[in-house]
Amino acid sequence: MHFLSRSQLSSAVKLFPPKFALCLPSKTEDSGFGDLFIGGGSYFLPPYQYDASRLFTTVSLISNETSFDEYFFQVKSIEIDEKAVPLKSPMILSKLSTVVPFTVLHHSIYEPFVKEFKSKASSRKMVEAKAKVSSFEVCYRVKKGFNMEDVPVIDLTVGSGGRRWRIYGRNSMVVVKKGVMCLAFVRGGGGEDREEMVIVGGYQMEDSLVEIDLQSSKLSFTSSLLRYNTSCSHFRPVSTDIGGRVAYTKQVVIS
């Protein structure tokens, strides 16, 4: 059992307050360490000048009788370039996992998700690559002058009021070889008894700040910090904020 799980034997539930946050770095040549914040924020991630918690979207953690030690939440819908993916269920059970490298979608979600993504990608003049790579089913050519901002935007809508986890190109596409990038979402199993319909993987969490508050049973997250001129990949010294909470610059996993 990992020390940051929800298990009663883990270290996470023994924290006071029982709250922590992760900032996972992207895996590039110039990446530094990520950050583990014990006891919660404030969260100062230079060169961003403000407390990064002001960027949070917050939703409730939910219990799962078959898996007490993991972090589950509900996704209400999935949108691609603001168009909803047609799904059978109005609520999608989802969980976080940095053990899983890329987000896994149940096959009943994966099929309409890929269909809609391909449609939006085509309208953005993205060209599919003929050769498929490893476990990825959808790949595209990286053309000269291509920018990750050209990739369709994926939204996991959560809670009320249209709150969302927005996933941009840097977290939705992975370059697998020269001139080829693939959609970093993979097909999950098709069993009807499989509860976790979406498993948000580590790649989608890179350069996003994710906070777990066990006392209030809340999950908070930001979209990519790169859009605010900062990231989880800077080399930062260990620092202590005014409240005495320590930010350990260390990459960790949470499940």
Image: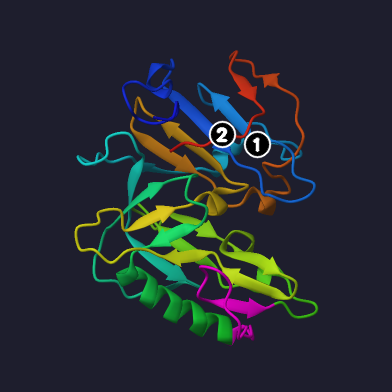
Question: Which of 210 and 179 lies nearest the eye of the viewer?
Answer: 179
Its colouring scheme is rainbow
Give the vertical position of 174 relative to 158 (above or below).
Answer: below
**Magenta span dominant secondary structure:** loop
The residue at which mark 2 appears reads as 252
Q: How far across and how far down the image is residue 105, in percent?
A: 38, 63
Tell me the SS state at disc 2: loop
Badge 1 or badge 2: first in the primary sequence: 1
Q: Which residues are magenta?
A: 123-141
Q: How far across and how far down the image is residue 206, in percent?
A: 60, 48
Give the vertical position of 229 relative to 22 (above or below).
Answer: below
Give neighbour class at mark 2: few <14, some 14-19, many 20+ (Cα, 10 Å): some
Give the vertical position of 165 relative to 221 (above or below).
Answer: below
137 within the magenta span: yes
Q: How far across and how far down the image is residue 162, in percent?
A: 39, 58
Q: Is residue 202 left or right of residue 112?
A: right
Q: Amino acid at mark 2?
A: Val
The residue at which mark 1 appears reads as 34
Q: Quadrant of residue 48?
A: top right
Disc 1 versus disc 2: distance between alpha carbons?
A: 8 Å
Q: Amino acid at mark 1?
A: Gly
Q: Is residue 210 left or right of residue 182?
A: left
The quarter in which the C terminus is drawn is top left
Residue 14 got which mark? none
Tell me the SS state at disc 1: loop
Q: Is residue 169 left or right of residue 193?
A: right
Residue under the image location 41 percent in, 39 percent down: 219
Question: Which of 191 and 237 lies nearest the eye of the viewer?
Answer: 191
The quarter in which the N terminus is drawn is top left
Point out the frontmost of discs 1 and 2: 2
Q: How far across and how far down the image is residue 72, in percent?
A: 33, 44
Dot 1 and dot 2 residues touching (CB under 8 Å): yes
